[in-house]
Each structure stands twice: as structure tokens, then as C-alpha cells.
Amino acid sequence: MNYNKRLADRIREALVHLPDVEEKEMFRGVCFMVNGKMCVCVSGDEMMCRIGAEAIEGVLDENGVRQMMMRDRPAKDFVYVSEEAFLNQKDFDRWIKLALVFNPKAKASKKK
């Protein structure tokens, strides 16, 4: 898979302090599962952050942020964030924090 390995390393470093983080290859990249739930992914050069529908309403007008679409419908809890929206560490940390704050409220996928 062709995804931004440097971005994956940044996310890995941001989550290293958490006890239950697992990496899975999906969405043309790597996804970081926290407490068994999808939290932050790297897809190509973008982060895909699971921040919840409420938080999405407040960020969609920002440069470099777009709602994730699945089968031509908005995925209600997910946004894609391009590099322009997390160039500095403060902005990067903000996206990680938004995903971690939503994580306890997120529903886990059903095991197959």
C-alpha cells in the first residue's frame, strides 16, 4: 500500500502512551484502532479522523478538511484531513485529540 509512512510514524508517536492501540491495514493505508475502535487512519497523504458528527459540523469549513463519503453518502463520524490542515504540531495534536475524545463514544465494529 502506498501511504505516507512519515505521517503514520507521527500518529504512532502521538498514540504511544495509550495502552490499547492496534494497527490494521485498510482504507489504502494504515488505521490505528484505539480500544478496539477505528480512531485515526493514514490514507495516501491524508489523515482520516473519527471525530463524531457533532465535531464535524464545526470543522468542515476549514481548509483541507472534507467529510468522508461511503457509497456516495457522508460517513457521519469521519473526516479526511489534508496536510495543509496539520502542518504545525499544534494543529496535528488538535486532530489527534478530537479523535481520542470521540473514541469512548464511538461504536466498535461487529466482529466477523
Image (cartoon, helix red, strand yellow):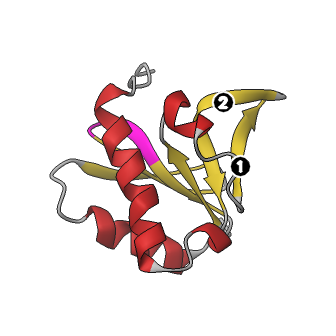
Q: Residues within 10 Å of mark 1 (few under 14, many from 20)?
A: few
Q: Residue at x 52, y 54 (%)?
A: 41
Q: Magenta stretch containing residue 14, yes or no?
A: no
Q: Classify residue 106 as left or right of residue 49.
A: left
Q: Quadrant of the N terminus?
A: bottom right
Q: Earlier in the sequence, mark 1 or mark 2?
A: 1
x and y percentages locating residue 103 in the rendered image = 34, 37
Numbered disc 2: secondary structure: strand
Q: Residue at x 71, y 62 (%)?
A: 64
Q: Residue at x 38, y 25 (%)?
A: 108
Task: Between residue 36 and residue 112, name the one nearer to us.
Answer: 36
Q: Classify residue 94 as left or right of residue 25.
A: left
Which residue type does callout 1 highlight?
Answer: Asp
Q: Residues within 10 Å of mark 2 (few under 14, many from 20)?
A: some
From mark 1 to mark 2, how far is it between C-alphas?
A: 17 Å
Which residue type does callout 2 highlight?
Answer: Ala
Task: Between residue 35 and residue 60, name the one nearer to us.
Answer: 60
Q: Quadrant of the C terminus?
A: top left
Rendering quarter of residue 35: top left
Chain part drawn in magenta: 35-39
x and y percentages locating residue 106 in the rendered image = 39, 28
Residue corresponding to mark 1: 61
Rendering quarter of residue 53: top right
Numbered disc 1: secondary structure: loop
Cβ atoms at labels 1 and 2 below 8 Å apart: no
- Does residue 47 sit above or below 6 in this rendering? above
Rendering quarter of residue 77: top right
Q: Classify residue 99 as left or right of residue 83.
A: left
x and y percentages locating residue 101 in the rendered image = 32, 42
Q: Residue at x 33, y 46 (%)?
A: 100
Secondary structure character of the magenta stretch overall: strand
Residue corresponding to mark 2: 75
